[in-house]
Amino acid sequence: MFNAIELWKQRFQLFLKEVRRYVKYIFNDHLKFILIFAIGIGAYYYQQWLETLSSSFPAAFILAVLFGVILTAGSVQTLLKQADVVFLLPLEKKMNPYFQRAFVWSYMMQIYILIIAGAAAAPLYMQQLKKPFSALFLFLLLAALIKAWNMFVTWEISLLTDEKKHLYDSLVRFGINFLFCYFLFVNAATIWLGCLVFLMITYLTLLHQSVKTKSLKWEYLIAEEEKRMTLFYRVANMFTDVPMLKTRVKRRRWLDLLASLAPDGHVYLYLYIRTFLRSGDYLGVYVRLSVIGAILLYFVPFFYARLAISVLFLYFIGFQLITLWKHHQSKLWIDLYPVSVESRTQSFQTLLFVLLFIVSIIFSAVIGIVTASFVMTGIIFGISTVFVYIFSYRYVKTKL
């Protein structure tokens, strides 16, 4: 006889086993050292930055945006698989205990993220808003309740197939979450909070009435679960081989000119450029980390912090691009190239050096624009260039 609770227990145990399998590779001693160093540097300059803030700094607005995003994001992790659309569809009416436990598990994980964000925001909250820690604790309790409301809404909205309604729902919930947090931070009148609570209850009630006769959208839930696991596998693939990771290929015709820059005869260099531009998410990771690093460099006012951020982001970008070397390892046809292994290694190192060198130029340009100091810009550019060379031609060689 079918038992939904036992099915959840089995799926959850398999999920934990799968996560532990790769987490031990992700959080190795090497990465732990980098993270501890980054957190220490970040905490030190975070405190330094707080001391430079004036009373007019819009802390309430910024914190409301931060927690508004956190409260809006997230959905129920169902752990469903592709075959479930066939085998569990006839048992949909018996799946309520399964989804109830999935909801509780997902909610606990979201609360964990909320607590981390609260701990990170605590110094800014207490210093700029002039409130005690007890007030922050009360806010987190209320935020946990608001998070439950968001989770209920996301589950109800998953019964709809219109993607525009999903987008509108996210915008509406972010607006409500933002206003609720902002009203709490600025000690707004209770009547405004009461109006928001009434709006939240009405919204959830109307949404529930509109979907109560609809069945589960199995394809949507499975697709969302696959997206979530694919993201995890992409992170794990930076540290070890992940056979379950599905490779995505995008044409990106507008980038063909970059591939033509490879000199004639450099077969592997051309192959790796094409792979970087089209396959997986290499280009996306490269651009996102470069933009994030540039934004941090723009706002951080301290020289040593800028230097640390430049080197750390160059390391993070380079470390994630190392997986490009293994991208074609399961393809036998590249072994037919009449080219030596040394040529393949040199081509990969050359591409990695060029990509990281471009990032170091961008970082240096941002620092030069902000500081207008030729000396500071030159020092950071020089150190970054030396790091890129050592990373590309010394460190990576030992990894390959």
Image: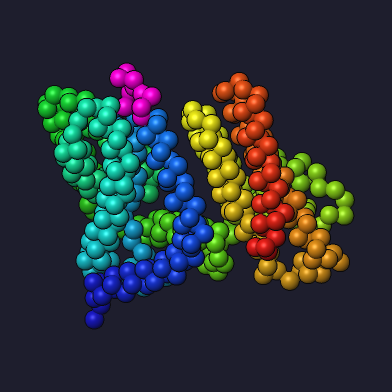
Q: Report if residue 20 is visible in the image.
A: yes
User: From which residue to which does the magenta span run?
Assistant: 50-59
**Residue at screen point 24% across, 32% down:** 126
Give percent across and percent down for residue 254: 70, 40
69 lies left or right of 93: right
Which of the 4 image quarters holds residue 136?
top left
Q: Report if residue 204 is visible in the image.
A: no
Q: Is residue 62 above or below residue 234?
A: above
Which of the 4 image quarters holds residue 223?
bottom left
Give percent across and percent down for residue 202: 17, 38
User: Where the C terminus falls, by quadrant?
Assistant: bottom right
**Residue at screen point 50% across, 30% down:** 302
In the rendered image, residue 385 lying in the magenta stretch gets the answer no
Which of the 4 image quarters holds residue 395?
bottom right
Most extreme residue toward the bottom is: 1
Most extreme residue toward the top is: 56
